[in-house]
Amino acid sequence: MAFFVYYYLCFTAVVSAVFFLLLRASRLRRLRLPPGNLGLPFVGETLQLIAAYKTENPEPFIDERVSRYGSIFTTHVFGEPTVFSADPETNRFILQNEGKLFECSYPGSISNLLGKHSLLLMKGSLHKRMHSLTMSFANSSIIRDHLLVDIDRLVRLNLDSWTDRVFLMEEAKKITFELTVKQLMSFDPGEWSESLRKEYVLVIEGFFTVPLPLFSTTYRRAIKARTKVAEALSLIVRERRKEFEGGERKNDMLAALLAGDDNFSDEEIVDFLVALLVAGYETTSTIMTLAVKFLTETPLALAQLKEEHEGIRAKKSESEALEWIDYKSMPFTQCVVNETLRVANIISGVFRRAMTDINIKGYTIPKGWKVFASFRAVHLDHDHFKDARTFNPWRWQNNSGMSCPGNVYTPFGGGPRLCPGYELARVELSVFLHHLVTRFSWVPAEEDKLVFFPTTRTQKRYPINVQRRLQNATSLAT
């Protein structure tokens, strides 16, 4: 009797599951999904996406599908059916309807490594408050009055240590990590910050892997590194909380989190810091490296950039720091920054989840489905930028070569989740380029092709041979 009960229950479960799948398939057919291919069960087209981004030219994944299906297509990546958008109007619609029709949703690999309390994953009023707090520590007035002096000092401190051969990507990562640690926790460069940075390298490697520790050594290693990072930051948070309760105050992000009315737990603060360190470290260092690469391959642009910065440096003593007025007198530098952001795409796009069935462009995005608004696909589309895949900073001098800039140029996202550190990233890159071109000349040390996929192992170190242009430069290390 027990056997027949067990058999009946199993049979009922199977029939129910099949019935559910048939109903869902019928519903999806009625909804008129964007065209596309869901690929293999569970894996979908994830492996094709990752493989494309690990090559020198990651565009074929999107190019081939846009050519076949149009600028909005269906795929299946990171374990979920996903609608990809390479259409600027659709991307803008997604960004502007954050919290209304779409909500933030990222692959499990990223969510697990950043932590459930990270700014990237926050929603609603809490996200609004924390986003505003983050922007208050990276707006123009704060950069001008407080951060610029540290940016200038730490950039020069790192460049002081450069010898004949430099691995530019590694050096850029050191600079940006030290700047971020200083801004968040008031730590100057040292053994502790360098040890923490090495663990971060492993964490970031796990972002774009299938989040299954049993099958991915990279992801397993990233989880272990994340635990070490959390332990190190938890210790700092506990120490700072004691200092705060004792009346000691510092002017940094951690102090603001401890003083806020939300009564954040140590775990919540750690998750928040983890995400901000990732954002400030990986993205800006990649832009620094790629800016040098693009300039090296475009001698006319490099010459014009040098002329602009030598003019600024000629008015200052050798060891005198840059001031805000100097930053505001770098028009061609800002063209270089704009073009580097467009071609390199530090934010390739954003993941969102549909909160309800959404009709757009004649298609329906079903409730619960992921969407990916691809900024990269728009930035590298010849319909929006003339010779879109060519580095051309002069296009920004009179907006020639681009159309509808408000719709198509979104290097820092947009809407309520606009990257809060967008101005800080521009300043850091501008200061770095100033000291690089006024103090050094360089050539690539060897052929070392950079790919744009945002992980440490897949991006080469980009070695360059450098020669100092200024003699007897004052060392800040002493």
Image (cartoon, helix red, strand yellow):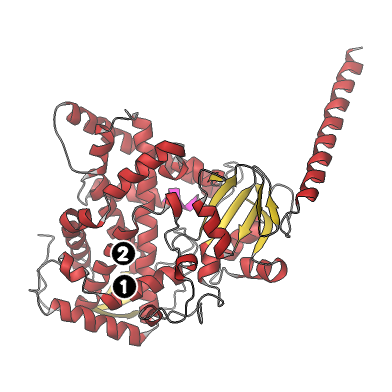
* Residue 43 lies in the magenta-colored region: no
What is the magenta range?
202-206
Q: Nearer the viewer, residue 54 or 317?
A: 317
The alpha-carbon separation of the residues under discs 1 and 2 comes to 8 Å
Left or right of residue 24, residue 256 in this image:
left
User: For the residue carrying disc 2, how many other residues have a C-alpha within 10 Å: few (<14), some (14-19), or many (20+)?
Assistant: many
Which residue does the numbered mark 1 point to in the structure image? 334
Q: Is residue 204 magenta?
A: yes
Amino acid type of the residue tagged 2 in the rendering: Arg
Q: Nearer the viewer, residue 375 or 310?
A: 375
CA neighbours of label 1 inside 10 A, class few (<14), some (14 to 19), many (20+): many
Question: Does label 1 or label 2 sit earlier along the sequence?
Answer: 1
In the image, farthest residue toward the top = 1
Q: Position of residue 308 (x, y in %)?
A: 22, 81
Q: Are marks 1 and 2 in contact (CB under 8 Å)?
A: yes
Which corner quadrant holds the C terminus? Answer: bottom left
